[in-house]
């Protein structure tokens, strides 16, 4: 599966109440299938501020939200990493129907950079001394 292009990166505000970009925008035309970044359950599917949003609860306080997005799944439905769960659908104030915004938070106000959670990492074993 090809990774989507990031059209606007995460921009953490200096203070949680200041302006910033609390997620990343991924290139996606209307109707693009969205796949789960990790195992989870659908925790919300509906409108927020007039925008269509789908959220996945991944456990341990982690939640991913996607907008504009719509799903046919019910709240509480389980999804597996890489499994389709929604599609890009609706109007966005981010990029004129050419992207989907993906935000990740660990708590109500603790937003994380989604790219740091999915980037490739090199794992190496160190000798025990």
Image (spheres, helix red, strand yellow):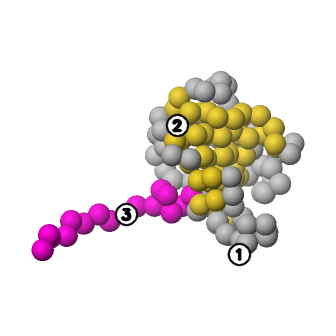
> Which comes sooner in the sequence, label 1 or label 3?
1
Mark 2 or mark 3, whichever is nearer to me? 2
Mark 2 or mark 1, whichever is nearer to me? 1
How many C-alpha atoms fall within 10 Å of the one at disc 3: few (<14), some, or many (≥20)? few
* Distance from the alpha carbon under mark 1 to that under mark 3: 27 Å
Res 40 label: 2
Q: Is residue 18 above or below residue 49?
A: below
* Distance from the alpha carbon under mark 2 to that under mark 1: 30 Å
Q: Residue at 66% across / 46% down in the picture?
A: 65
Outermost left residue: 129
Left or right of 104, for residue 17: right
- Residue 95 picture quarter: bottom right
Specify whether residue 25 is in view. no
- How many numbered discs sit on the rendered protein? 3
Q: Residue at 69% across / 35% down in the picture?
A: 44
Mark 1 or mark 3, whichever is nearer to me? 1
Q: Is residue 55 above or below residue 123?
A: above
Query: Is residue 88 magenta-colored?
Result: no
Q: Which residue is mark 3?
A: 121
Mark 1 falls on what kind of element? loop
Q: Is residue 51 above or below residue 12?
A: above
Specify whether residue 79 is in view. yes
> Which comes sooner in the sequence, label 2 or label 3?
2
Q: Which residue is mark 1?
A: 14
Foreground of the two, 8 or 64: 64
* Distance from the alpha carbon under mark 2 to that under mark 3: 22 Å
């Amino acid at each position: 599966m090809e990774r989507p292009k990031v059209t606007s990166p995460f921009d953490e505000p200096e203070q949680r109440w200041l302006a910033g970009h609390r997620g990343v925008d991924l290139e996606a035309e209307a109707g693009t299938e969205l796949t789960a970044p990790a195992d989870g359950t659908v925790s919300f599917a509906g409108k927020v501020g007039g925008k269509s949003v789908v959220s996945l609860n991944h456990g341990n306080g982690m939640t991913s939200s996607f907008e504009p997005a719509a799903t046919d799944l019910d709240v509480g439905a389980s999804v597996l990493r890489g499994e389709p769960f929604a599609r890009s659908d609706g109007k966005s104030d981010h990029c004129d129907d050419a992207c989907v915004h993906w935000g990740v938070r660990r708590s109500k106000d603790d937003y994380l950079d989604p790219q740091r959670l999915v980037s490739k990492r090199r794992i190496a074993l160190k000798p025990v001394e």
